[in-house]
Amino acid sequence: MANTSIGDYGLLSDRHSAALVSREGAVDWLCFPRFDSPAVFAALLDEGAGHWSIRPTAPARISRRYLDGTLVLRTEFRTDTGTLVLTDALATGPDEDPHRLGSAAPHLLVRRAACAEGTVEMAVDFRPRPEYGLVRPLLLPVDGGLMARGGATVLALTSPVPLTPGDEAATGTAVLRAGQGLDFALHWGSLSGPFPDVHPAAEVADQLAATIRTWRAWSDAHRTYDGPFSELVHHSGRVLQALSYQPTGAIVAAVTTSLPEEPGGERNWDYRYAWVRDSSFTMDALWVAACPDEADEFFAFLTSAAAAVSGARSRLQIMYGIGGEHDLAERDMPHLAGWRDSRPVRIGNDAWNQIQHDVYGEILSTASRFENWLDAGGTALRRFLPDLADAAIDVWHRPDHGIWEIRGEPRHFVYSKLMCWVALDRAVSLAGRLDVAADRVERWLRVAAEIQAAILTEGWSDEAGAFTQSFGGTELDACALTLPITGFLPADDPRVLSTLDAITAGLTDSRGMVHRYRTATGVDGLAGGEGSFLLCTFWLAQAQAMAGRVDAARATFARAADHANDLGLLAEQTDPASGRPMGNFPQAFSHVGLVNAAWSIARAEATRR
């Protein structure tokens, strides 16, 4: 519900869409048939925007976990009379090939309620509200369940429990005894067809079993990392895979919109899109956590979406819809109260039209990591990548909105300059494979040296004793932690070590978590504040490990990882006072940071032996 703690939710994914299930057994967020489709249940953002709950009628002690190697959620309710086990999954479809997990997803949410011991009375409360709560559908009884019709969405609910439809919801109860179980399912369809079906119980059970097998097969095929924190890394790999959109290879930043950076604040954004930066970072992390064979999907998405830019080559869009859409125009949803009254609730994201120069470096950095996959991209990709390096030359000296997508005036952000340098550095390393002319490579080398000199002079502040947020300034930014991570400077360079110390002293809260920057400077053009940033805290751990401060890196890593919920899911930010998760959830950036920090700690410890 709209007052439920963000950390109380578990993620389900079929690599097309996602659901969030609360500890209480309520599906409070579900978008069908895509991650960015209008929500069918949106109680996450407004109590009246729809949910589907299955739970005991009596008070219960609740525990939960994912089934090993999967994102299939098992919630156990222990009452005074017995134990109810609820198993939830978004069906992934047939399990023939784990590398194509979700390719035949049927857009089906499956839920099994089983009594493990004693006797339990359970209640079902089904109240769909398509289009973010705007539609109150007709609930029509059919054999084996209900049909919900209203607006463009048609839903078929398989329910072995007889439900009584009312104006608001369809409800019912049932008593289960030890060994008994009931299979429920929600199938999506549209008014234009095909229509969804009510499924026989055996078919629902088969869908659940196939989903468990498919996730486990994927996990078994992507278990190459064996360093410290391996379970966290492997689980993060599954979460990142769950955030990928199988039909195109796009990767969403998170599965939610408008979970705030500050309760009651206005920093509420829609993250259900594919940022070039986030997607590139995610592919890099999957290379560590899972050695993905799906890299060709990601590069295919880039060449069909990012490469298809109208106008000048230097106007690369920073984000796209997961189907490759360019226009992601933002609008408010005034009928939704927002999570804990955090308004406005936004659909779409106007950052799509911002100028952010770091994207060139992120794509080329990922291309260099997956160099052996580039041939599969064909001539279009080999032509696209060198053009990105040339575009970085065109724009590096201009101001932009930066990685944090400020809504204030553009600035000469150090991180944007750094990633333009990365673009050229990685392009040079790929020149042989991309068959680039020597004079073009020489230009890349020359301009890379110019950018490096500018960062070392204008990006450094003697007053701050650190590399700063923007040229000529003294304000700190956690992005400076990426200077050693990208290979711009050695991690033990005195200026890097001084920057680590300055950020630890100046951007770290009382819980040891790192802020992106100080919002009080007004750089982002927004009112209010925000939480500490998990990605930035993992960056600190990574930079500490690279600098040989391995014990400090482990301590920083542990502080950040401890902010995962009981299912190992990380939000974008944490509240500095309470440590509670804040922002959209679960957040790809945070899991990316965990994977990369763990890998750096592993390498540092191996070197120290």
Image (spheres, rainbow, N blue to C red):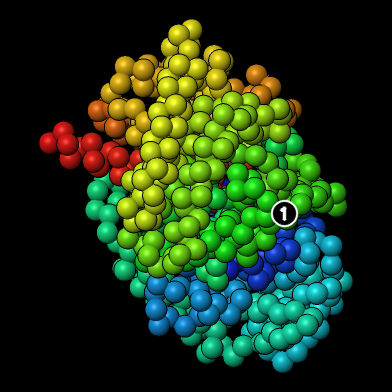
In the picture shown, does residue 465 fall above or below 373? Answer: above
The reply to whether residue 335 is in sight is yes
- Residue 509 lies, in percent from the top left, at 50, 23
Residue farthest top in this picture: 463
User: Pointer 1: residues within 10 angstroms few (<14), some, or many (20+)?
Assistant: some
Q: Position of residue 517 (x, y in %)?
A: 56, 25
Of residues 89 and 591, the one drawn nearer to the viewer in this rendering: 591
Residue at 55% from the left image edge and 84% from the top image edge: 204
**What SS does tag 1 mark?**
loop
Q: Is residue 571 above or below residue 110?
A: above
Identity, as a three-letter code, of the amino acid under mark 1: Leu
Residue 216 pos. (x, y %) = 37, 71
Q: Quadrant of residue 527?
A: top right
Residue closer to the observer: 242 or 341? 242
Give the left or right position of residue 1, taking residue 440 as reference. Answer: right
Q: Residue at x 63, y 26 (%)?
A: 411
Q: Is residue 14 left or right of residue 95?
A: right
Asked if residue 241 can be seen in this view, the reply is no
Residue that label 1 marks: 328
Tell how many labels: 1
The residue under the point 56% across, 22% down is: 470
Q: Quadrant of residue 157?
A: bottom right
Q: Quadrant of the C terminus?
A: top left
Q: Position of residue 433 (x, y in %)?
A: 34, 56
Q: Quadrant of residue 121?
A: bottom right
Give whichever of 384, 501 is nearer the camera.
384
Residue at (52% x, 69% y) in the render: 246
Question: Between 340 and 163, which is closer to the camera in this rendering?
Answer: 340
141 displayed left or right of 379: right
Horizontal side, residue 372 vs residue 470: left or right: left
